[in-house]
Image (cartoon, rainbow, N blue to C red):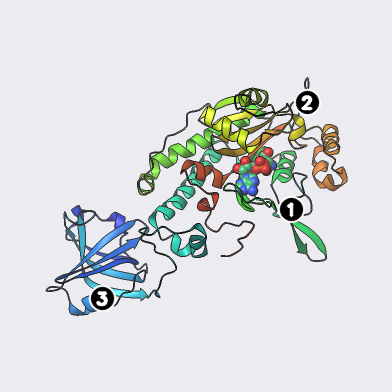
């Protein structure tokens, strides 16, 4: 039997006279002479429990007086309209039970009256998430995922899972976490890239995966983690332009879904969410270099990767979501398809928020010989990719796809300072617990 009949959010002054059972945390207890208040907090907000000392059962008053802050309590009582109460109602209790008492002192103050260091918050994340503004962010993240999944289902895309324990690097770099796998060495996968492409060779046509990626990068920035959730899509018979359209629709659709379905959470966060308009601007890498010349003291030549300062400058200049397209083939991974008539440029793209990159994608090389050539050009050994290359020898359709970072999407949507704020239990260079 569920121990509550209502969430605080279900109660309005119009419900005066009905009996409710609430369960949640003792947010605040105030004892003021003739009257005492218990503020109960649950997932949906707060309810004021009012104890009129002359009228309330003395046992109930005694119980309330003994409650330590943040204990889990259950309250049965009657709703009364009360214009002076925070949401226009109060609950007059007939019974209060302490279901689980909280120790004192608390590892942090969930009332949001006291500012707290990020590390302290992450160390006691269970307590941090009790703060309504933190909880609201994770509820919005769930809504974002729901909206993305619905977009994928609507487009006939099949959800898949690919292995996270793998034998080879995906992106060819060295930033892999080795693990011991019986008598062999294995790695945590950096990206489902190779697997989602193999599924194009399997005739699955359109796949998506939402799952963790692992990057053993030493970064200590506000937008990198060593474990992140990636939203990956791969579509057969589609080109780069087709999947960019899908991506901008998915991102702007997620904003729209949140703005329509998370009004309470946005209210808690004090956010007026603007839905980005599609189509997003498309800017080629070459145009971006031209724009970057507007920044004094910058010497960049064609073929250089865009550094963080340039990325920031472009974001400030453009001021909205945009795509960076037509990258030099030399700085995009081997699986990115070069233009036939201009092989130094490729069909790779990045989706940018003014603050940072959100996604990258491309039309892929689907010709076996060209793929082997591209792997060699990147100074990688095709032998290590045999399991992947095999899928290109027996009929591989042209295909395109992208990978979108969930936490970066949520972080930029909610204007969060640090990516760690967009992940329940983040993993970085220093943090492995909780
Ligand atoms: P890429 O490496 O650009 O592309 O990753 C895609 C997106 O995943 C997110 N991301 C990260 N987020 C937090 N911390 C990290 N260390 C981190 N690394 C990546 C970013 C990034 O834009 N295989 C390609 C995708 C594709 O072409 O389909 C890939 O992995 O938001």
User: What residue sits 61% from the left and 38% below the top?
Assistant: 359
Q: Is residue 199 left or right of residue 275?
A: right
Percent coordinates x, y for residue 152 in the rendering: 56, 39
**Mark 1, residues whose alpha carbon is within 10 Å: few (<14), some, or many (≥20)?**
many
Q: Is residue 383 left or right of residue 194?
A: right
Percent coordinates x, y for residue 296 in the rendering: 61, 27
Q: SS at mark 3?
A: helix
Quadrant including the C terminus: bottom right
N-term mark: 1 or 2:
1
Q: Is residue 417 above or below residue 328?
A: below
Q: Please tell me the numbered disc located at residue 344.
A: 2
Nearer to us in this view, 344 or 278? 344
Percent coordinates x, y for residue 189 in the rendering: 71, 52
Residue 427, picture quadrant: bottom right
User: What residue sits 83% from the left and 42% below the top?
Assistant: 390
User: What residue sits 60% from the left and 27% below the top?
Assistant: 295
Q: Is residue 409 above or below residue 344?
A: below
**Mark 3, residues whose alpha carbon is within 10 Å: few (<14), some, or many (≥20)?**
some
Marks 3 and 1, how far apart in space? 55 Å
User: What residue sits 82% from the left and 47% below the top?
Assistant: 387
- Answer whether residue 307 is visible to the viewer in this image: yes
Q: Is residue 293 above or below residue 29?
A: above
Residue 369, picture quadrant: top right
Q: Is residue 426 left or right of residue 302?
A: left
- Say which residue label 1 marks: 176
- Say which residue label 3 marks: 65
Q: SS at mark 1?
A: loop
Does the residue tagged 3 have its C-beta within 8 Å of any atom of ligand 1?
Answer: no
Figure quadrant, ligand 1: top right
**Mark 2, residues whose alpha carbon is within 10 Å: few (<14), some, or many (≥20)?**
some
Marks 1 and 2, how far apart in space? 28 Å
N-term mark: 2 or 3:
3
């Amino acid at each position: 039997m569920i121990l509550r009949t209502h969430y605080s959010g279900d109660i309005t002054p119009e419900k005066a006279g009905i009996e409710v059972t609430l369960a949640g945390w003792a947010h605040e207890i105030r004892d003021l002479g003739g009257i005492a208040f218990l503020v109960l907090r649950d997932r949906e907000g707060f309810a004021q429990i009012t104890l009129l000392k002359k009228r309330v059962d003395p046992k109930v008053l005694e119980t309330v007086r003994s409650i330590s802050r943040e204990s889990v309590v259950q309250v049965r009582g009657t709703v009364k309209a009360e214009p002076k109460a925070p949401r226009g109602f109060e609950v007059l209790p007939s019974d209060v039970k302490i279901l689980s008492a909280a120790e004192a002192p608390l590892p942090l103050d969930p009332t949001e009256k006291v500012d707290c260091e990020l590390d302290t918050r992450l160390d006691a994340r269970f307590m941090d998430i009790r703060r309504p503004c933190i909880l609201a962010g994770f509820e919005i993240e769930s809504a974002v995922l729901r909206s993305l999944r619905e977009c994928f289902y609507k487009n006939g895309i099949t959800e898949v899972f690919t292995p996270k324990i793998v034998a080879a690097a995906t992106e060819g770099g060295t930033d892999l976490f080795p693990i011991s796998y019986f008598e062999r060495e294995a790695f945590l996968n950096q990206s489902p890239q190779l697997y989602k492409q193999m599924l194009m060779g399997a005739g699955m046509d359109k796949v998506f995966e939402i799952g963790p990626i692992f990057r053993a990068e030493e970064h200590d920035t506000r937008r990198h983690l060593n474990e992140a959730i990636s939203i990956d899509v791969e579509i057969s018979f589609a080109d780069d332009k087709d999947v960019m359209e899908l991506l901008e629709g998915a991102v702007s659709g997620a904003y729209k879904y949140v703005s329509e379905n998370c009004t309470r959470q946005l209210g808690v966060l004090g956010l007026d969410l603007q839905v980005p308009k599609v189509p997003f601007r498309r800017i080629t890498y070459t145009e971006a270099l031209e724009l970057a010349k507007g920044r004094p003291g910058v010497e960049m030549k064609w073929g250089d990767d865009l550094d963080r300062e340039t990325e920031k400058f472009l974001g400030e200049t453009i001021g909205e979501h945009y795509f960076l397209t037509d990258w030099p083939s030399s700085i995009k991974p081997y699986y990115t398809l070069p233009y036939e008539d201009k092989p130094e440029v490729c069909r790779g793209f990045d989706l940018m928020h003014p603050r940072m990159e959100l996604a990258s994608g491309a039309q892929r090389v689907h010709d076996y010989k060209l793929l082997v050539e591209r792997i060699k050009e990147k100074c990688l050994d095709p032998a290590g990719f045999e399991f992947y290359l095999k899928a290109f020898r027996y009929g591989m359709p042209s295909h395109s796809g992208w990978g979108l970072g969930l936490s970066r999407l949520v972080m930029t949507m909610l204007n969060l300072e640090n990516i760690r704020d967009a992940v329940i239990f983040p993993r970085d260079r220093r943090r492995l617990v909780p």
